[in-house]
Image (tube, rainbow, N blue to C red):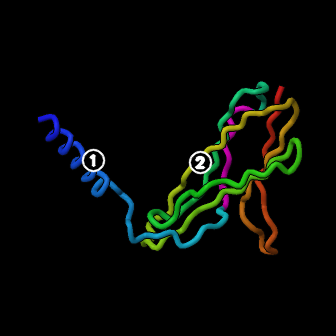
Amino acid sequence: MKNSLHYVAIFLLLLCVLRCNDRNERAYVNSSGAVQIDSVKIEQDTMALFSIQAIQTFSTFNYSCEGFYGYDYIYADEFNRDVTSYKFTTEAACGEKKVHFSQINFRPQQRGTYFFKFFNGLNSAGKAIWIEKKITVL
């Protein structure tokens, strides 16, 4: 009896792995690249040293064929950070555009004023446009 319960559990687990996958297996990732950050939400422009604050970024993706891939978080120097968001693109048919938010948890290690630049696309001359924010750490 005990062995049959193990077999049933293994069978259900395998069934779930095979059936519960909501990904379209034919929608392989084709590419990745920078995506414009449309807006940035910072709750507090002043915070305590070693505390954690969530910084939310909002970008627009084509539903079903694009998604958030990750951030490039560059320490330009001691108090300056450049943030670029990346998306992936798949072979799946694209749907309507939807706004998606992602989050960076900022935990400062030093007192001072931190300046953030978030990639907001390119201008007509091909030069990067940035959304600039600052956070003072006491």
- Which of the two labelled residues, at mark 2 and mark 1, occupies the earlier sequence position? 1
Q: Position of residue 93 (x, y in %)?
A: 42, 72
Q: From the viewer's perspective, tell me whether residue 19 is left or right of residue 56.
A: left
Q: Residue at x 54, y 68 (%)?
A: 89
Decide: is 42 above or below 76.
above
Within-10-Å neighbours for mark 1: few <14, some 14–19, many 20+? few
Give the amino acid at mark 1: Leu
Mark 2, other Cα within 10 Å: few <14 / some 14–19 / many ≥20: some
Which residue position is annotated with label 1? 13
Horizontal arrangement in the rendering, residue 19 relative to residue 78 (left or right):
left
In magenta segment, residue 43: yes
Name the element at disc 2. strand
Per the image, label 1 sits on a secondary structure element best described as helix
- 31 or 96: nearer the eye? 31
Disc 2 and disc 1: Cα gap in Å? Answer: 31 Å
Q: Which mark is residue 99?
A: none
Q: Magenta span covers which residues?
A: 36-44
Residue 14 sits inside the magenta stretch: no
